[in-house]
Image (cartoon, coloured by chain):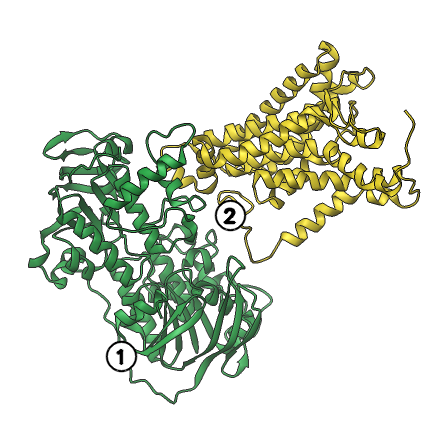
Chain colours: A yellow, B green
Amino acid sequence: METTDIGLWGVPLAMLGGAIRVSTPFIFVSLGEAITERSGRINLGLEGTLVFGAMSAYAVAVMTGSPWLGLVAAALAGLCFGLFHGWICKFPKVNDIAIGIALMLFGTGLAFFFGKPFIQPSAPDLPAIPFGAWSDIPQVQAALNVNVLFLIGAALAVFLWWAFRNTRVGLIVRVVGDSADAARAMGLNPNTVRLLATGVGGALAGIGGAYLSLYYPGSWTERISSGQGLMAVALVIFAHWNPLGCFAAALLFGGAGALGPALQSVGVTQGYYLFYAAPYILTLIIMIATSSPSRTLAGAPGELSITK
Amino acid sequence: MTGTHSKAIGVETIGMTMRFGAFTALDDVSIKVPAGSFHALLGENGAGKSTLVKCMMGFYHPTSGDMLVDGRQVAIASPRDASALGLGMVYQHFTLVPSLTGAENLVISREKVPGVIDWRKERTALAQFMERMPFKLPLDVKVAELAAGEKQKLEIIKQLYLGRNFLVLDEPTSVLTPGEAQEVLGLVRGMTKAGDLTVLMISHKFHEVTAFADDIAVLRKGRLTGTGKVSDLTHKAMAAMMIGDQPIAALDSRAAPKPDAEIVLKVKALKAPDRTGLKSIDIADLGVRSGEIVGIAGISGNGQKEFLEVLAGQRPRNGGEVKVRGSAYAATRAEARALNVRLIPEEPLKNACAPRMTVAENIAFRTFDVDGNGKPVSWISAGAIKSFSARLVEQFKVKTASLSSPIASLSGGNVQRAVLARELTGEVDLLIVSNPCFGLDFSAVAEIRARIMKARNAGAAVLLMSEDLDELLELSDRILVMSDGALVYETPIAQASVQTIGEHMAGHH
């Protein structure tokens, strides 16, 4: 097919496509972190979970030939990491943030160790749906080639938003996250609820990792994650722990991440690499803009160690 | 569950005894609360009230003793058993989940909650249930946005919603305005009269007991020291049952106020953000003269805490000025020392002590780095700290195992005594006090109030913030009411009326 020159229109189009492509891991990690934080714990280890999920998904996909089995493996690996975090944090005087940092380093280190033999072979990709097939313009087709995981993530965000209000499990997670005393008075064990919430959060982060290695960028390297797991934590705070907000914020971050490549694709040759830093600058700006020395964040779960 | 409209139940304890190791917390206590009665349980801190109640509710397993519910002997091994029998408890602190709405709180606390909640059906059921209740409450608002009185009502409603007809109320009015307290207790009283509810109320406030309860039981040091009909007992008789024959510190008689005395503390147009950052406190004009106690009343959360934090230097201000004896005051250590400003914040262990440092060190915080003439010293003398503290511990009757025990190991009353010892020693021109007697027992309260009055009579200007209106009425020369971050009402003590103050506290003016 011949490339059509659509000029500067290429920038917003590429950003839209980029937002959809880049945001998917953000969506999964931030939704997972939202569940964990709503239960009153912070899991900073999701960066490590993400990388380990990417590695295990790729490895299993290479060995079995099925990207879906890879996805399941990543979710299981993430579940294990999450449960491990939740289990350690139930002991008194254990700090969830310190454990998170330890697990982040542990996860990436372990992924590099087991991932060495899988840098060369190539694995099958997760399928995408070509929503842009109606158009003749390749840029439009590229932008609207949407991976199924993005759609699942979008549906999951809506489901979680609904479930936090309308299901028993959702209410229980919120009760535990807001007041451990009230939860105990109801006969709930906060540690068990948090263990499971951290486990589910880890599994979702693992799926986010699978997307990285099995679709975009689509291969396993040691530099596969550029801090998405950590930025997702910032994103949850920015989204005020609301799953729909997480989805929107993930798109925003994804769009910012696509700015650099988009400018490059329309022929900007100077300074575009500065725009590669856009997501990080955006993280900083958001954290500064939403922080205050004397005020706690609206919507913050009462049991979080950072807001207590 | 909630549908059935069951009747009040009677509860009785027989020879309840609870030992923790060698310590006997509860010694052979038998009380009888007949169905449909309003019973008050009185006693000082540590008298065994909460131990008794916890035994009844299944939190503790008594060493010996039995429970009768409606005349039948029952075994209560856990709070779940108590709840199945219809016994419920409303705690002093709220157990509602702040970020959930009232309706969500009620539904999730039920024993059986469906996996997916059909809110339309639940709302209809709740509306029907609420029609039978004497309280009217918005159930679609987040609990965090409810006033304290509404939260307390919701706590009681929750117990009734869960089908509990015997309620233990643990100091239910400690966070309410006098008006709210009247309303809540009045409604509860109505339900007991109608035979829908039996109440056992733990309380310190005699006037509430007299106004609402049928009978009382009094505990002292784990023993039942008295029971009787409220109508037969005077406050004096109740107090005697509670504290026995120990001496109570008498309040100094109030020295005559001097209306032209120097204004020591002057606050003008002070603005500061409150805890949420959404609202701000705004003190237009406040002056406290030497030799007077100015009381600030208000429901907690109306900015008193923030005001104190600004005066204590714990919170930045957005504008305005604070002057002590004419010079600007920003609460630095040097200024506090030069102007003789002393501070007794609420929760002294948290706000005025280093909990793990020793009693001696904590008492010496104001003086450890200066010598006898107020000159800075380069070497700190442990011996001087010890002898200074030993003197004050003696003088203020702080009960401590040793001067080198961590201050956190002291009881609440003794921590407060140690802080008073530190703050009231030496010259005091301005004393800022907040809720000094919260959670302390009778004799400690009397003593601490006497010390504050003594400081006033010695010429200190005292700014007293308290959530306890009785305390303010007892101590203050003038009372101001703080509501929504501003001082909205002022009255000299001679003309003070609880009614009017309460209305201003609730923001009805």
Chain letter for the residue marked with disc 2 in the picture: A
**Protein chain holding label 1:** B
Q: Quadrant of the C terminus of chain B?
A: bottom left
B264 and A173: which is toward the camera: A173
Which residue does the numbered mark 2 point to in the structure image? A308
| Discs 1, 2: same chain | no
Q: Image quadrant for the N terminus of chain B? A: top left
- CA gap, disc 1 to disc 2? 43 Å
Q: How many marks?
A: 2
Q: Amino acid at mark 2?
A: Lys
Say which quarter of the image contains residue A101.
top right
Horizontal side of residue B194 vs A102, given as left or right: left
Q: Which mark is residue B495?
A: 1
Residue B238 on image: x %, y % = 14, 58
Single out the mark in the foreground, 1 or 2.
1
Residue A64 in the image, given as x and y percentages of width and height: 71, 10
Residue B131 relative to residue A133: left or right? left
